Image: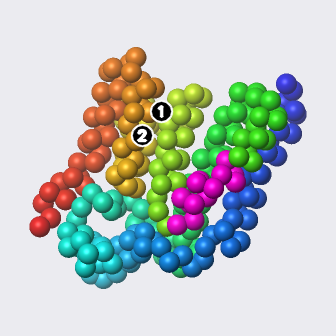
Amino acid sequence: MTQLGKYRRQWILLVPLIGIVWVWISSLSFNPVPWPDDSAFFFVSKDLFSWPPRWVMIPQAPFEPTYRIWNFNTMPLFPILIGIFRGIGLDGPHALKLLPLSGWFLSVFFILRSLLRGNAPLFLVFSAAIALTFEPILRWSSVITRPESLIGLMGVLILFGYRFGFPGFLRERKFFHPVALFLWAGAMLHFNAIHLVPLAIVLYWREPKTLLKIGAVTFCGLLPWIATIALKP
């Protein structure tokens, strides 16, 4: 295929962009959503970015008192991202949906990019674009203020980098591995990112030293949060 032909196929990448933007501005975004998970992350972020900052899950505390203390149920990265969004003016239940929606879009984008780079038939790429853009489970997990779509993106980035190589700034170093970075980011978003661990094992089981390094670097990255939870009364 000529270089011009490859560029002409790039229009397919507009399918998820148009479709997901449509979901966001339509009634499919459920705005406002009377969904408790939104408040579970929103109020944690609100308390964290107030003065004095504190880390609590007030909305759930009447039902589960341990939510008032530091725990593994709400990891810090997603509330921090919410706080950053609110700080730049993207506030409210509708605007904050851009966080999970961006995870959904970027996941589809990199999947389609992998198919295009592999010279998959145009019909297959277009079918994948339509299916992944309008799949109801992906949509549902992306229109509530939860981090699952972003965690899914971490898995897609691991696969994409493994298949096509990671960019230079993410190259493996003595005390760094890109897969460990994505595993760490997923874990810091929510503890259910544990399902990314089998993915790393399947990809690197023939390289036990690399696999051990990925695990060790990921664990070291999580140590500050583990220590914080252990030391917080």
Q: Nearer the viewer, residue 152 or 174?
A: 152
- The percent coordinates of residue 158 (x first, y second) are 50, 37
Nearest to N terminus: mark 2 or mark 1: 1
Q: Secondary structure at mark 1?
A: loop
> Which residue type carries mark 1?
Arg
Q: Residue furthest top?
A: 206
| Residue at mark 1 | 171
Q: Does the image show residue 15? A: yes
Q: Quadrant of the C terminus?
A: bottom left
User: For residue 185: magenta?
Assistant: no
Report if residue 177 is visible in the image.
no
> Which-is-in-front pick, marks 2 and 1?
2
Q: Residues within 10 Å of mark 1 (few under 14, many from 20)?
A: few
Q: Is residue 78 left or right of residue 48?
A: right
Extent of the magenta region: 132-144
Q: Which residue is drawn at the image coordinates 38% and 71% (left, top)?
A: 40
Q: Is residue 210 above or below residue 142?
A: above
Q: What residue is shown with label 2?
A: 196
Q: Give the dominant element type of the magenta stretch: helix, strand or loop.
A: helix
Label 2: state its secondary structure: helix
Q: Which numbered circle lies on residue 116? A: none
Color style of the picture: rainbow
At a point 74% along the width and 34% down the height, the residue shown is: 116
Residue ID at (27%, 41%): 219
- Along the viewing direction, whichever of 209 and 151 lies nearer the viewer: 151
Q: Is residue 82 above or below residue 4?
A: below
**Residue 24 at x, y = what percent?**
66, 68
- How packed mark 2 is, by other alpha carbons closer than 10 Å (few <14, some 14-19, many 20 or more), is some
Counting from the top left corner in percent of width and height, residue 23 is at 69, 65
Q: Residue at x 48, y 54 (%)?
A: 148
Location of residue 129 (image quadrant): top right
Q: Is residue 139 magenta?
A: yes
